[in-house]
Image (cartoon, helix red, strand yellow):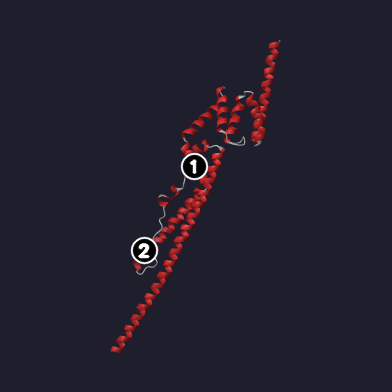
């Protein structure tokens, strides 16, 4: 009889833990992380592998208040030792994080967007002189600026299509990042995005200002030159008249 009562007690205890685990999961889904953490911690301390795994993930992703990878690993190992498959997978993920640390850091503070400005999107600004005096130079400068403008417009479209830059982070790297790393990456890439846009605006403004100054100076020279030629022809005409 005592044995039966003991088994019944274990069953009731298991049912209670299951109910609390469901409550903890429900709180987590509602983003009540404080409430979920309290229940997960109670169950994890009692040896529940599902709670240990869930609590480990909260520490890993920062939902426990801050990222604590060491604490997460400790909990995952406890759950994995009891056969929890999610915890085993989490430990494998952490192992991959160590192996791909350089790739993770690259998207947090190393990526510079240089790949967005290669090939057909590499727009080299033409050298514009202060003024041109011959038609061949005038045509050459005009064609060079037109080609640059076309390239620039394509680059700006390409850059806009690439935004937000956070979507360029490979999916396998995103999966390895914790909450803190994801936030740092998003902030870094958002700033880089703004920098690239500003760089494009400034480079366009400067080149077009140089082109406008060149055009005005060249037009002024051409106008003066044509006037000089016209006056010279007129003087030559009247000189010929006088000779006659």
Above or below residue 202? Residue 37 is above
Foreground residue, 105 or 150? Answer: 105
The C terminus: image quadrant: bottom left
SS for dot 1? helix
- Percent across and percent down for residue 178 are 55, 37
Question: Which of the labelled discs sits on residue 166, or is there none?
Answer: none
Q: Gap between marks 2 and 1, in whole Å?
A: 42 Å
SS for dot 2? helix
Residue indicated by mark 2 = 140
The 10 Å Cα crowd at callout 1, few under 14, some 14 to 19, many 20 or more, is many
- Percent across and percent down for residue 13 are 68, 21
Q: In the image as oriented, which residue stretches furthest toward the left?
A: 244
Question: Which of the labelled discs sits on residue 107, or is there none?
Answer: 1
- Residue 217 visible: yes
* Residue at x-position 35% and y-position 66%: 137
- Pointers 2 and 1 in contact (C-beta within 8 Å): no
The N terminus: image quadrant: top right
Above or below residue 28? Residue 139 is below
First in sequence: mark 2 or mark 1? 1
- Percent across and percent down for residue 97 are 49, 34
* Residue at x-position 35% and y-position 83%: 234
The part of the image, by quadrant, that contains residue 58 is: top right
* Residue at x-position 48% and y-position 33%: 98
Q: Nearer the viewer, mark 2 or mark 1?
A: 1
The 10 Å Cα crowd at callout 2, few under 14, some 14 to 19, many 20 or more, is few
* Residue at x-position 68% and y-position 22%: 15
The part of the image, by quadrant, that contains residue 181 is: top right
242 vs 58, left or right, is: left
- Residue 164 visible: no
Foreground residue, 126 or 121? Answer: 126
The part of the image, by quadrant, that contains residue 36 is: top right
């Amino acid at each position: 009889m005592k044995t039966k009562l003991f088994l019944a007690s274990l069953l009731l205890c298991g049912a209670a833990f299951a109910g609390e685990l469901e409550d903890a999961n429900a709180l987590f889904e509602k983003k009540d992380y404080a409430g979920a953490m309290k229940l997960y911690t109670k169950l994890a301390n009692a040896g529940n592998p599902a709670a240990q795994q869930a609590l480990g993930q909260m520490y890993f992703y920062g939902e426990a208040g801050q990222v604590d990878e060491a604490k997460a690993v400790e909990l995952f190992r406890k759950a994995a030792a009891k056969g929890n498959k999610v915890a085993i997978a989490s430990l494998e993920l952490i192992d991959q994080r160590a192996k791909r640390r350089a790739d993770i850091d690259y998207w947090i503070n190393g990526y510079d967007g240089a790949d967005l400005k290669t090939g057909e999107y590499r727009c080299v600004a033409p050298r514009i002189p202060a003024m041109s005096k011959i038609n061949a130079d005038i045509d050459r400068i005009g064609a060079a600026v037109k080609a640059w403008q076309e390239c620039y417009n394509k680059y700006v479209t390409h850059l806009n299509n690439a935004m937000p830059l956070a979507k360029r982070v490979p999916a396998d790297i995103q999966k390895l990042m914790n909450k803190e790393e994801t936030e740092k990456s998003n902030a870094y890439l958002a700033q880089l995005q703004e920098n690239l846009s500003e760089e494009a605006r400034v480079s366009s403004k400067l080149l077009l200002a140089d082109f406008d100054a060149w055009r005005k100076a060249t037009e002024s020279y051409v106008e003066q030159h044509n006037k000089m030629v016209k006056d010279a022809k007129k003087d030559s005409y009247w000189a010929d008249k006088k000779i006659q």
